[in-house]
């Protein structure tokens, strides 16, 4: 079993997220801290995000840190656990909503597309879109 960071690197499906984590200086957190549950958007998830929006997040250190920390929850929550949870508090400080829907488990209305990648410092669940904290969602919606 490897760290969250090593697991994501080895997968080859999370290069955009890994680049953002590097820019934000979060590689150490994803390597040694925890345990954490990470809801990680795969590279396909970023294709739906306008390039200008991704660059705006990448260039603003505070916004980048808040966005990435919004994907991380203290503790280990497997898919079985998520079936019985309705909210999780992110490291960023705002809650994520968890819903069991006909199409599967949703986090903030975003599908969990792969689950339960166990790591030495937590667990990863791949999601189909970037999760934006409430303030960032408001900025994105209103320009």
Image (cartoon, rainbow, N blue to C red):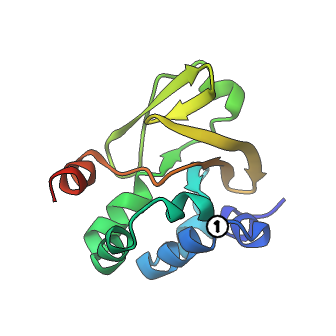
The residue at 36%/66% (across/down) is 65
Image height check: is 126 above or below 84? below
The residue at 62%/74% (across/down) is 15
Image height check: is 106 above or below 142? above
Q: Is residue 75 left or right of residue 50?
A: right
Q: Is the N terminus in the top left, top right, bottom left or bottom right quadrant? A: bottom right
**In this figure, what is the number of numbered marks?**
1
Q: Is residue 31 left or right of residue 140?
A: right
Image height check: is 116 above or below 57? above
Where is residue 35? Give x, y as percent.
61, 50
The residue that disc 1 covers is: 14
What is the secondary structure assignment of the residue under circle 1?
A: loop
The residue at 74%/71% (across/down) is 12
Where is residue 22? Give x, y as percent.
51, 80
Q: Nearer the viewer, residue 101 or 36?
A: 101
Where is residue 11? Give x, y as percent.
77, 66
Q: Nearer the viewer, residue 128 or 131?
A: 128
Q: Is residue 19 left or right of residue 63?
A: right
């Amino acid at each position: 079993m490897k760290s969250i960071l090593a697991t994501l690197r080895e997968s080859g499906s999370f290069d955009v997220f890994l680049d953002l984590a590097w820019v934000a200086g979060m590689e150490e957190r994803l390597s040694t801290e925890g345990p954490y549950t990470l809801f990680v958007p795969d590279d396909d998830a970023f294709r739906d995000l306008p390039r200008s929006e991704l660059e705006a997040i990448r260039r603003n250190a505070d916004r980048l840190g808040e966005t990435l920390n919004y994907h991380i929850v203290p503790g280990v929550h497997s898919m079985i656990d998520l079936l019985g949870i309705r909210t999780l508090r992110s490291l960023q400080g705002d809650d994520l909503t968890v819903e069991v829907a006909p199409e599967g488990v949703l986090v903030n209305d975003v599908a969990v597309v792969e689950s339960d990648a166990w790591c030495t410092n937590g667990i990863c669940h791949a999601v189909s879109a970037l999760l934006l904290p409430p303030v960032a969602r408001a900025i994105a919606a209103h320009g």
